[in-house]
Amino acid sequence: MNVADARIVWGVLWRTTTALGGRDTYIINGKDCLPMLFLTQRKAREFIVREYGYIKTRRDLRSEPHGWRMPIPVRVKVCVLTVAGRRGRA
């Protein structure tokens, strides 16, 4: 794989921390179970505030048993790989 084949974009990392479940993180998915990806960190932050900003004011969601934390923007490296022998097939 060539370094030029990779692109850095921004994703949104969901976070929870509970006594029973410990720490859990994952990239938030959008439509069709594909990760929400943004070209800029600013766009990712705007999405977080718009869709998850209510978590800041909901102490009940931040405490046990939920343990929600505000999502954060994270850098994501996207690489395109081609499987040999399958060129042109869908």
Image: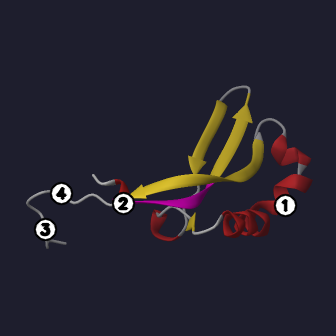
Please state which amino acid type lies under the numbered disc 3: Arg
Q: Earlier in the sequence, mark 2 or mark 3?
A: 2
Q: Residue at x 84, y 60 (%)?
A: 54
- Disc 1 to disc 4, C-alpha distance: 43 Å
Residue 79 found in image quarter: bottom left
Element type at marker 4? Answer: loop
The relative height of residue 17 versus residue 32 in the rendered view (above or below) is above
Q: Indicate yes or no whether the magenta region holds residue 10.
A: yes
**Label 4, residues with CA under 10 Å away: few <14, some 14-19, many ≥20:** few
- CB within 8 Å, label 2 to label 3: no
Q: Nearer the viewer, residue 78 or 32?
A: 78
Is 16 left or right of 36, judged from the image as shown? right
Element type at marker 1? Answer: helix
- State the residue position of label 3: 87
Q: Earlier in the sequence, mark 1 or mark 3?
A: 1
Is 50 left or right of 85, judged from the image as shown? right
Q: Earlier in the sequence, mark 1 or mark 4?
A: 1
Q: Nearer the viewer, residue 46 or 7?
A: 7
Residue 28: percent from left, percent from top: 59, 56
- CB within 8 Å, label 1 to label 2: no
Disc 1 or disc 2, which is closer to the eye?
2
- CB within 8 Å, label 1 to label 4: no
- Disc 1 to disc 3, C-alpha distance: 46 Å
Disc 2 or disc 3, which is closer to the eye?
2
Point out which mark residue 54 bears.
Answer: 1
Where does the magenta region start and end?
A: 5-12
- State the residue position of label 2: 4
- State the residue position of label 4: 83
- Disc 2 to disc 3, C-alpha distance: 20 Å
